[in-house]
């Protein structure tokens, strides 16, 4: 068995962590979609796009900057992958509003490395 250098080990660990974050986000996304579909069928009505955007933002799988875990606190700063299904509408709204919107006391904006400044969506309290 070949021993990996510390750099290679760190790179592999980072890839695994990124993969797990994507998998966790996808699982969270799938669960929210199933619950949402069930509620729509149960109520026999479809919410308008603006209602989905405003009511659904706190239900996205936000990662806390502070704890590095998913957060259920709707007023906690955090980030989310911009390319997951549930975040696509939010990303679209950000595109239409020059990359920044404020909803219910929270500011939403794109973030990411220089090579991909729209890789993530960040949120933070406005006050």
Image (cartoon, rainbow, N blue to C red):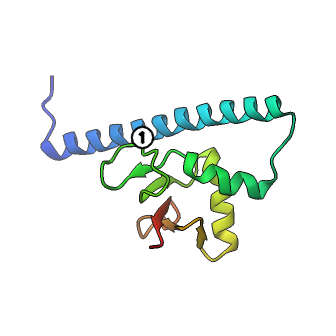
> Dot 1: what SS?
helix
Q: Position of residue 39 (x, y in %)?
A: 74, 33
Q: Position of residue 45 (x, y in %)?
A: 86, 39
* Depicted 55 relative to depicted 125: above or below: above
- Name the residue located 46 percent from the left edge and 35 percent from the top edge: 24
- Name the residue located 46 percent from the left edge and 44 percent from the top edge: 72
- Left of 16 or right of it: where is 109? right
Which residue position is annotated with label 1?
A: 21
- Left of 5 or right of it: where is 27? right
Is disc 1 surrounded by few (<14), some (14 to 19) or many (20+) residues within 10 Å?
some
* Depicted 40 relative to depicted 105: above or below: above
Identify the image quadrant of the N terminus: top left
Q: Position of residue 107 (x, y in %)?
A: 52, 69
- Name the residue located 47 percent from the left edge and 62 percent from the top edge: 122
* Depicted 35 relative to depicted 60: above or below: above
Q: Nearer the viewer, residue 112 or 68?
A: 68
- Name the residue located 47 percent from the left edge and 40 percent from the top edge: 22
- Left of 127 or right of it: where is 93? right
């Amino acid at each position: 068995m070949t021993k990996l250098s510390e750099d290679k080990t760190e790179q592999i660990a980072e890839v695994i962590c990124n993969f797990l974050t994507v998998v966790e986000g996808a699982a969270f996304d799938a669960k929210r979609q199933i619950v949402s579909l069930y509620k729509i069928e149960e109520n026999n009505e479809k919410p308008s796009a603006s209602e989905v955007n405003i009511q659904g933002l706190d239900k996205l799988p936000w990662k806390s900057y502070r704890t590095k875990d998913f957060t259920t606190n709707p007023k906690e700063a955090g980030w989310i992958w911009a390319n997951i299904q549930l975040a696509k509408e939010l990303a679209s709204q950000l595109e239409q509003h020059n990359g920044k919107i404020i909803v219910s006391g929270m500011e939403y904006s794109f973030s990411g490395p220089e090579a991909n400044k729209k890789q993530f969506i960040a949120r933070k309290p406005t006050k």
